[in-house]
Amino acid sequence: MTPTTFETEQTYGLRKSLSRAIPYILLTISILPIIIGYAWIFIATFSVRTEGLIPKDAHGNIGGLTLQNWSFLHNPEVWNATLNSFGIAVGMVVGVGFLSSLTGYALARMNFAGRKGFLGTTLLLHAFRPEMLLIAIFQVLLFIGGIPLIGDWVGFNTVGGVALVMITLDLPLGVWLMKGFFDNLSWDMERAALIDGASRFRVWWEIILPQIKPGLAALSIFTFITGWNAYLIPFTFTIGSKVANLPVLLNRFSGDTSLGSWNEVAALGLFQLVPILVFFIFTQEALLNIYGGGSKGGA
Amino acid sequence: MKVALDNLTKKWGTVVGADSITLNINDGEFIAFLGPSGCGKTTTLLMVAGIYKPTAGYIRFDDYMVNHMAPKDRNIGMVFQSYALYPHMDVFKNISYPLKLKKIPAKELKERTRKIADMMGIGHLLDRKPAQLSGGQQQRVALGRALVKEPGLLLFDEPLSNLDARLRLSMRSEIKRLQLELGITSIYVTHDQVEAMTMADRVAVIQSGRLQAFAPPDELYDRPQTLFIAGFVGNPPMNFITVDILHENGLFSARAPGLTMPLSAGHTDKVAEKGRVIMGIRPEDITIANEGAAGEVYIVEPLGRDDLIDVKIGDLHVHVLADPEMSLKMGDTVNLQFNANKVQFFDPETERSLLW
């Protein structure tokens, strides 16, 4: 082997590993601002103040680490808001999940008058921004609030009411998503179950729903995050801290306090982020675990 | 269970799936719906299953009209081409699902499921998920699930189409044996004429939603009622030659350019007056002899036991089965003898057999 060919091979190997590395380099560069942002929030929550990413104490010296910013954890208002946020998010997961999987199934599998029109209208309604509907929804919530018994749970200025509105606004997306998942299932399995002796509802519950678990998990994550981060609807349809959720409380924090406690706001923001991360860790396996086999061919 | 279809019709708007199909199936009989893809055989089967509602006509089980009966009440078992196993349940749960729905007590459910699984040779796979099974094993599970509730009627929708050729052969005989042993009335949908011929007591040939014939396999093969059946049943397929019926010196013969064949006595009066007709003859009913219609070997396809020879007579191509030992080659000149007793004649307009 001559030195020349050896060199050529070496440069070739270098070029190859370089071309392999390029996507990673580009990805890293593009994600860097986000990572720095989160890193700043994380560092800020444990510092008196920061300069760039460097924690500083009140005199501008490096250091000044503190847990002071997390003192809001003693504040019962925060825990009440957390509970409210949780109520809205869970209410949405259950409500949207249940209604969309039933509606989506009917739309995917049954033929009834007005099916096409319903599908079209649903999509159209989803195109409207919720801001446009605020006043109308306000009227509806006031009306519901006036109904005895029900009104105390899902009327104006209740967590149930906020959840109800959020569910309604999220249903079109959920229904379409679920319909898509049902459309992808083979008819044969359903027919087999009907012939085996199952009722239509039982087929849906025992045979079809387990097949779309990944879809249901995805929808749950979407709606949970939507519900957890909900701001506009809770802000508009709740008064006072009793029914406020975390984003509304966060807004009040940042609005009420001087610039000096930005670090406290950052801590509350991070606090709000934690359940989402935990939820994602627990559901990502369900998201990735898609059943295979047992059905060949078919549509 | 006896099954009767009476003018059974299914339409979607102007699209016709099945067009007044009428046939009677005897108790314990194994019948096949045979036809090309999209001919309406599966549509008809799904109406029998209760999945599709007929547009018109009646379905009777043992003289009882079941048009409006839900699938679950029809006491049927069905095997699908796609197997249609429940992927989230293991084999035991798959097979026992019909029993669970019937609220069979746990002990009996276990016993019956095990018995069926052993019968199907999958007793050792009960705790596997369908995804962990081979295609043949999945098909056995599907069969077991269909049989476990001891149905009065078994429906098969191209159950072997997804298996490889070898497995298909063994499953074919296995299904046939099971059906004979259990004596369950069965309807078997297939587009594979070999499957239909080898398994079924009677074959219903369906084309474009219409029932063309409902007859034992031998009869379909030996005396096809229509041009379609003659062409569809049998492999290699029948030769079709347009011939003129001639009457010379008191003798009738069929003639096409380059070949003349005297009519057999039995056929003479049925085709004598027709003029131009379509003559059908199977490759095995033509022999290569010393005299007869002269032609040139166009192509030789070795099939192992026989050679399939494409002989060119003028513009006409005729397929003939020949002994490989004759070692014919392209370009050889051969003489063909037609077995006059085995030929079929069809009306070119109605495409119906003139011999019926």
Image: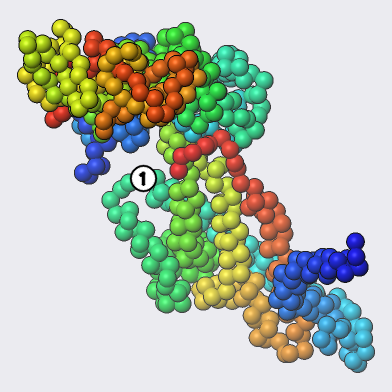
Please determine whether, in this image, residue A257 is positioned above or below residue B355.
below
> How far from the left and from the top, in percent, is residue A297?
49, 38
> How far from the left and from the top, in percent, is residue B66?
28, 24
Identify the residue shown where x is 24% and y is 16%: B343
Identify the residue shown where x is 57% and y is 26%: B136
Q: Amino acid at mark 1?
A: Met
- B81 on left or right of B116: left
> How far from the left and from the top, in percent, is residue B12?
25, 42
Mark 1 belongs to which subunit? A
Q: Is residue A68 visible?
A: no
Disc 1 element: loop
> How far from the left and from the top, in percent, is residue A212?
54, 47
- A248 on left or right of B161: right
Identify the residue shown where x is 43% and y is 22%: B328
Q: Is residue B20 visible?
A: yes
How is the protein colored in the picture?
Answer: rainbow
Which quarter of the figure is the C terminus of chain B placed in?
top left
Locate residue A56: give its quadrant.
bottom right
- B100 on left or right of B286: right
Locate residue B321: give its quadrant.
top left
Locate residue A23: give its quadrant.
bottom right
- B356 on left or right of B280: left
Please determine whether, in this image, residue B255 is positioned above or below residue A192.
above
Kindly identify which residue carries mark 1.
Answer: A110
At label 1, counting other C-alpha atoms closer than 10 Å, the crowd grade (few under 14, some 14-19, many 20 or more) is few
Residue in front for this viewpoint, B60 or B354: B354
Residue in front for this viewpoint, A109 or B340: B340
Residue in front for this viewpoint, A217 or B179: B179
